[in-house]
Image (spheres, grey):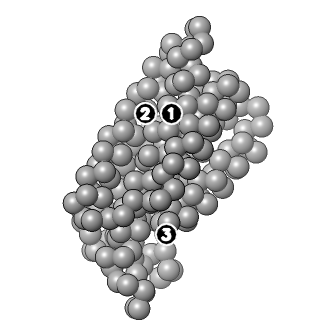
């Protein structure tokens, strides 16, 4: 069993500390995802002929807002301190969304595919760690993991992998997500 599979270690503050970290980072991630879609919408809603992609992005944003509302509730109910980095994630998320949308529809979809894939992997690890520990949180992350997969699959169908420099763009975005996940757990 690896450290990721265990919600806590002896002497680290226990299960509650680890659960708070999980909720904190999930809240931060959903907040960031909403900001990315808002950045994309800011671009696509102001471009003629982009109604279809704007509607698709708005639909995915609505799903992320629902996720965020769930974690907003859990933060309050469980007394979890949200990340102090929310202002940073707001600016960076919106900026990433707007920048990839300015690069074109395929680049925006590449961003979505990369972010959703990183989050899906994160949720899968959490679900495994939560087995037998917190059924409510495990159910939430398992459901949201499936939603993220749906968004990723939609982005791929819409041409994400045809974006110029897809491998580089996707890799950079996934790396950024993984760093944001680690930092948001603690700060």
Query: Looking at this view, is 168 or 87 the one in front?
Result: 87
C-beta proximity under 8 Å, tags 3 and 1: no
Q: Which mark is residue 186?
A: 3
**Residue holding disc 1:** 37
Q: Secondary structure at mark 1?
A: helix
Query: Looking at this view, is 64 or 20 the one in front?
Result: 20
Of the two numbered discs 2 and 1 on the same chain, state the one appearing first in sequence. 1
Whether 159 is drawn above or below 82: the answer is above
Whether 42 is drawn above or below 174: the answer is above
Whether 186 is drawn above or below 105: the answer is below
Residue 175 x %, y %:
66, 55
Whether 181 is drawn above or below 186: the answer is above
C-beta proximity under 8 Å, tags 2 and 1: yes
Q: Secondary structure at mark 2?
A: helix
Residue 122 x %, y %:
49, 59
**Residue 139 visible in the current orientation:** no
Q: Residue at horizontal 57%, vertical 42%? A: 91
Query: Looking at this view, is 187 or 159 the one in front?
Result: 187
Q: Is 114 on the left-hand or right-hand side of 171?
A: left
Q: Is 156 on the left-hand or right-hand side of 129?
A: right
**Residue holding disc 2:** 61
Kindly indicate the quadrant of the structure image that contains residue 46: top right
Q: Residue at horizontal 37%, vertical 32%? A: 62
Q: Secondary structure at mark 3?
A: helix
CA gap between label 2 and label 1 equals: 6 Å
Q: Residue furthest bottom?
A: 11
Q: How many numbered marks have been drawn onto this rendered protein structure?
A: 3
């Amino acid at each position: 069993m690896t450290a990721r599979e265990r919600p806590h270690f002896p002497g680290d503050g226990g299960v509650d500390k680890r659960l708070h970290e999980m909720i904190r980072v999930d809240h931060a991630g959903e907040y960031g995802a909403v900001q990315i879609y808002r950045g994309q919408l800011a671009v696509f809603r102001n471009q003629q002929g982009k109604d279809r992609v704007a509607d698709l992005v708005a639909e995915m944003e609505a799903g992320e807002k629902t996720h965020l509302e769930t974690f907003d509730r859990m933060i309050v109910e469980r007394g979890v301190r949200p990340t102090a980095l929310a202002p940073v994630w707001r600016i960076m998320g919106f900026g990433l969304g707007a920048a990839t949308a300015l690069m074109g529809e395929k680049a925006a979809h590449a961003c979505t595919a990369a972010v959703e894939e990183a989050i899906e992997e994160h949720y899968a690890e959490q679900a495994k760690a939560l087995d037998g520990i917190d059924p409510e949180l495990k159910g939430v992350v398992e459901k949201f993991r499936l939603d993220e997969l749906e968004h990723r699959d939609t982005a791929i169908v819409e041409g994400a992998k045809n974006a110029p420099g897809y491998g580089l763009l996707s890799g950079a975005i996934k790396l950024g997500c993984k760093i944001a996940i680690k930092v948001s757990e603690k700060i």
